[in-house]
Amino acid sequence: MILNSSILNSSILNIEQALAQAATLLADPTKVRRIIFSGKQRNLMPPYQRIDIRPVQLKAGLHWQCVSHDGKKDITKNLPLDQLNLGNYLMDGYANLIVENDVQQFNLRVTKSGKAEFGFTKVSRDIPNEISLSHDRIKIRLLDETDPIFIALGISDNDGVLKPTRTDKFKQVQEFLKNIVEVLPEVTKKSLANKAIKIVDLGCGHAYLTFAAYKYLKNQGFAVSVIGVDERTDSRERNSQIAQQLGVSGEVKFEAKQISNLADFEVDVAIALHACDTATDDAIAWAVKNNARAILVAPCCQHDIQRQMQVAPAPWSIATRHGILHERLGDLITDSLRAQILRILGYKTEIIEFIAGSHTPKNLMIRAMNTGVHNLNRTPAAKSDEVKAKEFAEYDLMLQQWGITPKLQELLAAQLDALR
């Protein structure tokens, strides 16, 4: 949805006071468009990745339809109006809350100190006033299949109808966008005034995600600039032609070069969808060195560590003697070490299943938020010596037991050595 960029209110209160502000938008449930809980508070683990709530008209009267998403399936429950308690969801550990009616949107973020940072924005007049109370499930799509970018990319036909053969790619894009939404509150908290955001897509290929990220954020009222990077010259030429066709070549640009050769520039969000083998390491390393506030990577084909796993520590040989298990275990070790390196460097890091395996077998995502100072190269995120020592000890033990050296460690050697 497109929101007016002017912030009507921005403040920090305790959670109870902030929820009292949110309740003003719930006075008339028939005018509520959506309620969303997402993210997680420090040291807490909510039961679901995200919860979407909206009013629905049932035979028994108006209810709240609550759809909980765990990354694999959706669980739907209908609650009587008087049984919805926003505070209970925050107590479950969710960090972000959106409440939107036909006039305003309320945004709340629970800070590390447990305070509630919140603000109101006006809902754009471009959004239709009608609010559907139908109980029939409405697919949550951040970008509709009729959007011109999907037509230009060949995902939808000229009439805006999704091509059956492109359903999996369309779904991947939608689910990746949801993760961009997840990190937005943290990414934009220091730039709400101008709503400017810069994204780099490392290993962009046919640029499905490049264009989708641009269009979604543009629809939200952000001043967006996106750079897609791929080593193939033909990809750059094709993608640049599509950008020109869509009239966005001033804001969406492409470069033909290896990630490791990409020039330095500050960026808010770095994304990489299925960059093969150590190209994912190149993407993570570039993002860290350039102070990305958020890193979203879906790894692919982790051959580097697999090749190094020559002798398995006891008793893991009972697994690695089987080729398919050797390969999968190598994948898990690779991504675990990548996540640990990011943790050591001060990133709040999690590995999630961003899409069901039926759409792609490469469905894991490393999602990392920069929790330290903005320039990691200058001053690494503050941690106690005890915590840093423990994280390094776990990491070093893994390397010693398996006799391996991750590519990402080599790429970020200076940053890691600075913390030892």
Image: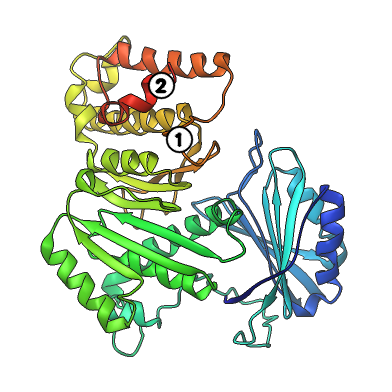
Residue drawn at x 15%, y 70% is 237
Question: Is residue 368 visible to the viewer in this orientation of the structure?
Answer: yes
**Structural distance between the alpha carbons of marks 1 and 2:** 11 Å
18 or 92: which is nearer to us? 18
Q: Position of residue 183 (x, y in %)?
A: 53, 52
| Vertical order, 142 against 134 (above or below) | above
Residue drawn at x 35%, y 51% is 265
Work out which residue is located at the far top of the displayed protein and give it: 314
The amino acid type of the residue labelled 1 equals Leu
Work out which residue is located at the far bottom of the displayed protein and give it: 159
* Label number found at residue 316: none
Q: Residues within 10 Å of mark 2 (few under 14, many from 20)?
A: few
The amino acid type of the residue labelled 2 equals Ala
Question: Is residue 213 visible to the viewer in this orientation of the structure?
Answer: no
Q: Quadrant of residue 30?
A: bottom right
The residue to which callout 2 is attached is: 418
| Vertical order, 74 against 397 (above or below) | below
Describe residue 147's horizontal placement relative to residue 45 as left or right: left
Describe residue 40's horizontal placement relative to residue 82 as left or right: left
Describe residue 96's horizontal placement relative to residue 152 as left or right: right
Residue drawn at x 67%, y 80% is 134
- Per the image, label 2 sits on a secondary structure element best described as loop
Q: Quadrant of the C terminus?
A: top left
Q: Quadrant of residue 316?
A: top left
Describe residue 131's horizontal placement relative to residue 357 as left or right: right
Q: Position of residue 215 (x, y in %)?
A: 42, 73
Residue drawn at x 47%, y 61% is 197
Q: Position of residue 211 (x, y in %)?
A: 35, 69
260 or 37: which is nearer to us? 260
The residue to which callout 1 is attached is: 376
- Marker count (numbered): 2
